[in-house]
Structure formats: structure tokens, C-alpha cells
Amino acid sequence: AARSAGGLNSGEVRANPGKLLKYSPPNSSANEMLLVGSLQAALGVMPFVALSDISYSCPQYSEIQQPSVSAGNFSIEEFDGTWYLVATNEPTIPSFCTCGVNEVKVHPESGTYEYYNRDTCFTQNTSLHIKGQLSPDPTTPGLLHENAAFFNHTIGTLVPNMIFSVQRDSTGTITTAFTYACLGMIPPLKFSFNVLSRSLHWKLAELQALVAAANQTTAGKLDVSAMRYNDETAYRSCGFVSKLAR
């Protein structure tokens, strides 16, 4: 997107040292990002080497936020717990890393959250700790900001990870969450679309249909290219037999 005289347009995001990435035009200079271990990255951004004047397009949360995650319909505490990464195009996860699992802890008292992402890469299990800040705005409970944490401390700028839609079962319990992260890296600049589920019981065609429906409801504003899927067969091959039996 083209620059405005005062910086970036409101539909853009610029990395900003030590601060959250916002959706209004910032006035400060570009930051430094450090890339760390692509084998262990998921749903967050690793910093990269010093870059000059980095900017990238990112949808405003208001453009993709669905009624299911509006104030009164969604509480961020519902995001706590175990989630299976059943569909993703996270660019920092190699294609040979599958069967992702996120163990999420939400800390509303401190306005923070964290999770461990675990993936199976060939026969090796990898793990990455992610920490972030909850939305301070009660009208946007799904607008999160996060980054990788090493020795329990985040490194670099917290970047947007947006819970833009959820699905519920007949009891009202959330079964599926859809997230979109804006990743500030070297060109080509990337985004991360993810489907998180409480269940492992998915067929490939069902997951593909979920992604297509989410893309339609957000009017094509999301990058859903190069999707990779973890269906029931994939999790079974990774040894999740006992969980599949539930």
C-alpha cells in the first residue's frame, strides 16, 4: 500500500520497537526483527535482523472480526486450554512439521496470556513458548499481541494475532477458533491463517470447507494460500491414538 505523508495508511502495520503493532498510522521509525528457529515457530513472529523502513499490509481487526467474537458473544477466558492446529499456512513452520498442539493459559488478572506450541518434525517433537498481551478494549476481546518467549521473556515487538471467529457446539462451548497473524519479516512479508480445534476428529474435506467459508465471510482479505492440514489421519500417524479414542 502507498504511504501517506504522515507515515502508513490505517490499513497497514509498521514494526515499532518495544510497542504493540497498532492499526492506526504510527509515526515512529521501523524496528529491528530477529528470526529465531523456524522449526519451532507457530502463530507468532520471531524477530529478524536489522531492517530499514519495514512496513506491510495487514487487515484492520474491524474488517475481519465476526459477530461470534464481539463483546458479549466471546470471552477471552474461553481461549484457555488445549487446541489442535488442524489447518495452517504459518510460513515459519516447515511442511515436515505436523500435528501441532497449542496449550494456552489466559491470565485475565494481568492482561496477559501464553501458550506452548508443540509440533512433530519427522520423529522429533519441537516446542516453543509464546507470550502476549490481551486486548485492553472490551469491544475487541480477540485482538491479541504476542511474540516468542525465551527464559520466560518475550523478544522484540509484540505483533497482532487476531481471533476473528469461533464456532460453538449445541451446548454453547467453543469447538473451533480461527486466527490470523500478521508477521513482520523480510520480504516477501507473510501472514498466518490458522484453524484451531478442540477435537482431532476431522476429515480433510471438512477442514478445507472451514477455510473456504472463513475466506468468504472475510471477503477475501486473508491470505489462505499454501494451507496445510492436520486431519484425523495425520494425528493418528503422530501417535495421538489415545486422544482419538475419546
Image (cartoon, rainbow, N blue to C red):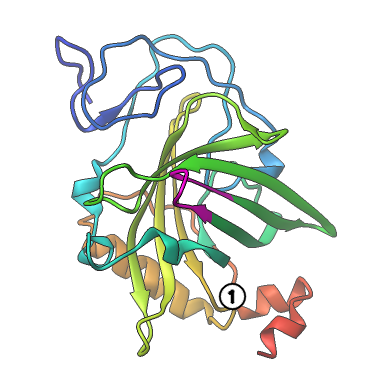
> For mark 1, what is the residue?
231
- Looking at the image, residue 242 sits to the left or right of residue 228; the answer is right
Residue ID at (56%, 66%): 81
Residue range (magenta) = 106-114
- Along the horizontal axis of the image, is 141 left or right of 144? left
Residue 189: percent from the left, percent from the top?
A: 43, 31
Determine crowd level at label 1: few under 14, some 14-19, many 20+ residues with C-alpha closer than 10 A.
Answer: many
Q: Residue at x 35, y 82 (%)?
A: 172
> Based on the displayed image, in which of its 4 quarters is residue 179 positioned?
bottom left
Q: Nearer the viewer, residue 63 or 232?
A: 63
Residue extending farthest to the left is 5
> Would residue 6 be visible to someone looking at this image?
yes
Task: Compare residues 21 and 132 and report the one nearer the observer.
Answer: 132
Residue 213 rendering spot, x and y as whole percentages:
30, 69
Q: Secondary structure at mark 1?
A: loop
Query: Does the magenta portion include 109?
Result: yes
Residue 199, horizontal then vertical, whole percent: 55, 78
Residue 229 in which image quadrant: bottom right
Q: Is residue 162 magenta?
A: no
Where the C terminus falls, by quadrant? bottom right
**Relative to residue 206, is residue 119 depicted above or below?**
above
Q: In this picture, is 100 found above or below 39?
A: below
- Please state which amino acid type lies under the numbered disc 1: Asp
**At 49% from the left edge and 65% from the top edge, which residue is drawn?**
196
Q: Is residue 85 visible?
A: no
Quadrant hosting residue 230: bottom right
